[in-house]
Image (cartoon, rainbow, N blue to C red):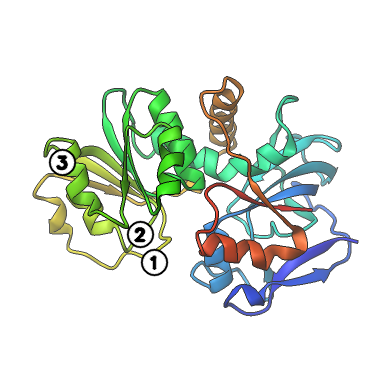
């Protein structure tokens, strides 16, 4: 029977409730997808806690998954029943065994790409893609700092940047994660539990600083990230795992003519053409082996609360999936 993981009020992982539902039907422009795997992301936690409020409560969180199209509504030409497809969508509703979604958000999957891998890379992989080619134009020979280098986005971003010829410095929180970061292309790894990452970056770059910092951590690293930049450097703040960044004086950017951006994946996949192109770029580097996905951690669909606890507790180093 179709089921969802629904919240009736914002709060901790205990607010995630497994509930049976009637079989949904696609409306005009929509497709019904039977999901095999659902991606778990920090955005889901932000939705659960109310940091990113849902349109209404009760509601279903989540915006990533992969499976098979079961039916389509009127006017749909992008996919057809029987197609395997994956998505990374701004609209919540992903924690469901069957879900309806705008067909224009679905990316048909090539034959060689299995549903598990697709569900694991749509958000994090396309995030790495737009961070390197959209929010900032990464160029061979540049140096960059990647926070949480052993995390899901971090591992993909470091590999891809290294493949492009950038010198990648990564921050991690343990020796075990440092080994992962090195294996993913970091030329220098900083364990922030033991050393000040700003001082370490300055020392490694002979005082020059890096061209760009990719910061998904937020409050705990923001000011230090700015201090790591060389003149005219760019801080790409794309997450807030440690909490939202506090308001700050814009004059802090003026000393080195620094750039700051707070991008989101969905601004860079706003049109179907952009979505398909970014997905195609991602699929290409996965197929040729330039970027490799670490085996994702799997939780049963009904164990979404445990998956959230693992992500919030930083108990994993790669992607978390709910297996339907």
* Picture coordinates of residue 109, whole percent (x, y): 71, 31
The answer to whether residue 19 is visible is yes
Q: Is residue 94 left or right of residue 238?
A: right
Labels 2 and 3: the sequence-earlier one: 3
Nearest the camera: 223 or 298? 298
How far apart marks 2 and 1 lie (CA) works out to 6 Å
Q: Is residue 195 above or below residue 275?
A: below
Q: Nearer the viewer, mark 3 or mark 1?
A: 3
Q: Find disc 2 in the rendering and name its residue.
A: 218
Callout 1: helix, strand or loop? loop
* Picture coordinates of residue 253, whole percent (x, y): 16, 52
At horizontal 45% and vertical 47% (from top left) the residue drawn is 176
Q: Find disc 1 in the rendering and name its residue.
A: 243
At horizontal 35% and vertical 23% (from top left) the residue drawn is 165
* Picture coordinates of residue 160, whole percent (x, y): 45, 30
How far apart marks 3 and 1 lie (CA) works out to 28 Å
Q: Give me the disc on residue 203.
A: 3
> From the image, which quarter does the N terminus lie in?
bottom right
How far apart marks 2 and 3 lie (CA) works out to 23 Å
Q: Residue furthest right?
A: 1
Callout 2: helix, strand or loop? loop
Q: Give me the disc on residue 303.
A: none
Q: Nearer the viewer, mark 2 or mark 3?
A: 3
Q: For residue 114, what is the image quadrant?
A: top right
Q: Residues within 10 Å of mark 1 (few under 14, many from 20)?
A: few
At horizontal 82% and vertical 36% (from top left) the residue drawn is 80
């Amino acid at each position: 029977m179709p089921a969802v993981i629904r919240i009736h009020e914002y709060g901790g992982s205990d607010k995630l409730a497994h509930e049976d539902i009637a079989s949904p039907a696609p409306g005009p422009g929509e497709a019904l997808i039977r999901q095999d795997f659902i991606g778990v992301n920090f955005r889901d936690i932000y939705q659960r806690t109310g940091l990113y409020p849902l349109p209404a409560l009760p509601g279903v969180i989540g915006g990533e998954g992969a499976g098979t199209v079961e039916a389509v509504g009127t006017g749909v030409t992008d996919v057809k029943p029987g197609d395997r497809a994956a998505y990374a969508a701004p609209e919540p509703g992903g924690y469901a065994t069957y879900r309806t979604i705008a067909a224009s958000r679905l990316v048909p999957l090539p034959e060689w790409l299995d549903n598990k891998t697709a569900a694991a890379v749509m958000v994090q992989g396309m995030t790495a893609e737009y961070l390197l080619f959209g929010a900032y134009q990464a160029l061979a020979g540049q140096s960059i700092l990647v926070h949480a280098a052993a995390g899901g986005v971090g591992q993909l971003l470091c590999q891809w940047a290294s493949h492009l010829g950038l010198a990648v410095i990564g921050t991690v929180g343990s020796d075990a994660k440092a080994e992962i970061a090195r294996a993913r292309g970091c030329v220098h790894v900083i364990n922030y539990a033991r050393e000040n990452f700003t001082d370490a970056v300055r020392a490694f770059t002979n005082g020059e600083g890096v061209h760009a910092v990719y910061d998904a951590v937020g409050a705990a690293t923001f000011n230090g990230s700015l201090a790591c930049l060389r003149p005219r450097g760019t801080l790409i703040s794309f997450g807030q795992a440690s909490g939202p960044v506090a308001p700050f004086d814009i004059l802090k950017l003026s000393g080195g003519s620094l750039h700051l951006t707070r991008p989101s994946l969905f601004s860079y996949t706003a049109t179907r053409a952009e979505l398909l192109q970014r997905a195609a770029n991602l699929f290409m580097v996965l197929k040729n082996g330039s970027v490799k996905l670490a085996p994702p951690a799997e939780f049963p669909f009904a164990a979404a609360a445990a998956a959230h606890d693992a992500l919030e507790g930083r108990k994993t180093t790669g992607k978390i999936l709910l297996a339907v």
